[in-house]
Image (cartoon, grey):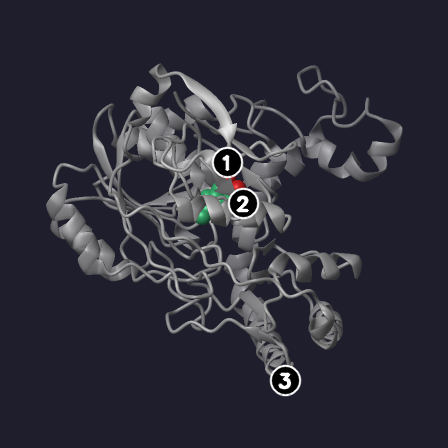
């Protein structure tokens, strides 16, 4: 696709189609300096450039090459991120009123998919350790849920998690398939998996029916570009494409699609050697972290992605405070919560970046005893119910009102309440607001965390059912 795009540009000195910037000829002067090369690639479905929603040429070929590289049967390029892939897959699997088994701490897009499809999510319970790191699902709990909800249209899990915890996809897939259910893995954080023996295997390699990967997160394509991989007969690729035509723009971005093509070529041809270099540098870096006095890497017993590093500090120092301090030194990280900070590395991380980070973290480590001490707050348990109290569809018909968060115990939430990042809804629409969740959210807001679904100009307030 990239080669076809470049050939096209060489053959076409002027164009008489959209987009109106005409490959950058009309564009803000100050912006031009930064955008110029990308604007040249920003074309539309003309000449040999094919059509994402009906691919027969260069895009078809690029997707075929991606399927081969990621060892899938089919691969679709997504220009609406993994969000679009989650939505389209759930819309394909579920009709209104049908059940789907969903890991309770899935990304919000999974729940949005259920809302759009009118599906009833039933939740796989999930446990967290004292650092707020999730415990992987027990395949037996998946089996029990399938036995309880045998008519469910599929099982949706997340692997790896934001913090890099990897599920036992192989066994979960076997359980699902023994009951003729498709397994969908939100692998937004796992596009690099399977490209080096020291990394966990990818979901597709372990038997998942669908895996949706944010190629833009851990590999090298542009933001908003993802891939959806499928194998087997339990899902219909043509049906997923039909839903994608409804969800995504009818003018998909060529820079995004070409960047997916290049990310595929890069990881397929250079992946092993680049990952080898990165993993060796990270071993050395982690060795240095072990020598810090107050800051520690959160250790987990379960398999995890070595490209994620989660740090906590002694003395009850919050992740928000550490992230603020790091921002002031020009170090911007993926995520902070009340306990910890998360660093994401990738094949784009250079040795010199790690040397600088180590230097700054050493200084942070020395500063930690002077940080204000926070009382410990534990991550609340998710609701133990396997279904929301009020279903999504009924919620739309009921009246709502805003009330202070502090007086909302026992009320039914109408919107997702989602600390962001990581974007995992703590409360779903239709769920009861429990006391422990409210005190946790109040504390997160007080410490400076961002919570979607709460209005916090003045007193934090929340929308509930009348
Ligand atoms: C687990 C998970 N799934 C899906 C998404 C959405 O991915 P995208 O940003 O590619 O739409 C995210 C984004 O953070 C995520 O963390």
Q: CA distance from mark 2 to mark 3?
A: 35 Å
Apparent side of residue 440 relative to residue 318 in the rendered image (left or right): left
Indicate the secondary structure of the residue bearing disc 1.
helix
Q: CA distance from mark 2 to mark 1?
A: 8 Å
Up-down: is 211 above or below 292?
above
Q: Are marks 2 and 1 in contact (CB under 8 Å)?
A: yes
Judging by the rendered image, the residue that carries numbered circle 3 is 291
- Residue 442: which numbered mark, if any? 2
Q: Mark 3 or 1 closer to N-term? A: 3
Between 7 and 124, which is closer to the camera in this rendering? 124
Apparent side of residue 288 relative to residue 188 in the rendered image (left or right): right
List x then y, in percent, for residue 223: 60, 42
Q: CA distance from mark 3 to mark 1?
A: 42 Å
- Residue 405: which numbered mark, if any? 1
Up-down: is 436 above or below 305?
above
- Residue 55: which numbered mark, if any? none
Between 80 and 358, which is closer to the camera in this rendering? 358
Q: Residues within 10 Å of mark 3 (few under 14, many from 20)?
A: few
Q: Residue 112's image quarter? A: top left
């Amino acid at each position: 696709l990239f080669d076809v795009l470049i050939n096209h540009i060489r053959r076409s000195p002027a164009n008489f189609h959209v987009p109106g910037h005409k490959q950058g000829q009309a564009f803000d002067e100050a912006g031009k300096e930064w955008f110029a090369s990308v604007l040249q690639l920003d074309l539309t479905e003309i000449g040999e450039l094919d059509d994402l929603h009906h691919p027969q040429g260069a895009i078809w070929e690029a997707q075929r090459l991606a399927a081969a590289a990621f060892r899938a049967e089919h691969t679709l390029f997504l220009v609406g991120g993994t969000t679009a892939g989650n939505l389209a897959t759930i819309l394909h699997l579920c009709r209104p009123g049908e059940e789907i088994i969903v890991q309770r701490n899935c990304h919000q897009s999974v729940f949005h998919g259920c809302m759009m499809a009118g599906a009833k999510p039933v939740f796989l319970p999930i446990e967290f350790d004292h650092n707020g790191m999730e415990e992987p699902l027990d395949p037996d709990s998946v089996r029990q849920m399938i036995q309880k909800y045998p008519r469910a249209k599929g099982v949706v899990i997340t692997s790896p998690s934001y913090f890099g915890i990897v599920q036992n996809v192989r066994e979960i897939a076997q359980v699902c398939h023994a009951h003729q259910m498709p397994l969908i893995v939100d692998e937004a954080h796992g596009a690099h998996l399977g490209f080096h023996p020291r990394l966990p295997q990818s979901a597709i390699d372990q038997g998942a029916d669908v895996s949706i990967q944010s190629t833009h997160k851990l590999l090298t394509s542009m933001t908003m570009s993802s891939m959806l991989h499928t194998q087997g007969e339990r899902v219909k690729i043509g049906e997923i494409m039909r839903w994608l035509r409804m969800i995504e723009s009818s003018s998909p971005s060529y820079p995004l699609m070409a960047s997916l093509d290049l990310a595929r070529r890069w990881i397929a041809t250079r992946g092993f050697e680049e990952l080898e270099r990165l993993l060796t540098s990270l071993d050395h870096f982690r060795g240095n972290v072990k020598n810090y006095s107050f800051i520690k890497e959160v250790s987990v017993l379960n398999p995890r992605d070595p490209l994620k590093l989660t740090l906590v500090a002694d003395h009850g120092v919050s992740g928000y405070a550490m992230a603020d301090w790091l921002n002031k030194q020009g170090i911007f990280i993926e995520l902070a919560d009340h306990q910890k900070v998360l660093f994401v590395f990738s094949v784009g991380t250079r040795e010199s970046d790690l040397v600088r980070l180590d230097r700054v973290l050493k200084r942070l480590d020395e500063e930690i005893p002077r940080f204000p001490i926070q009382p410990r707050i534990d991550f609340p348990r998710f609701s133990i119910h396997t279904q929301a109290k009020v279903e999504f569809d009924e919620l739309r018909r009921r009246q709502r009102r805003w009330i202070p968060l502090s007086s909302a115990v026992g009320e039914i939430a109408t919107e997702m309440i989602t600390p962001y990042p990581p974007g995992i809804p703590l409360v779903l629409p239709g769920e009861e607001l429990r006391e422990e969740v409210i005190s946790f959210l109040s504390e997160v807001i007080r410490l400076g965390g961002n919570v979607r679904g709460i209005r916090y100009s003045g007193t934090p307030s929340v929308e509930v059912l009348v």
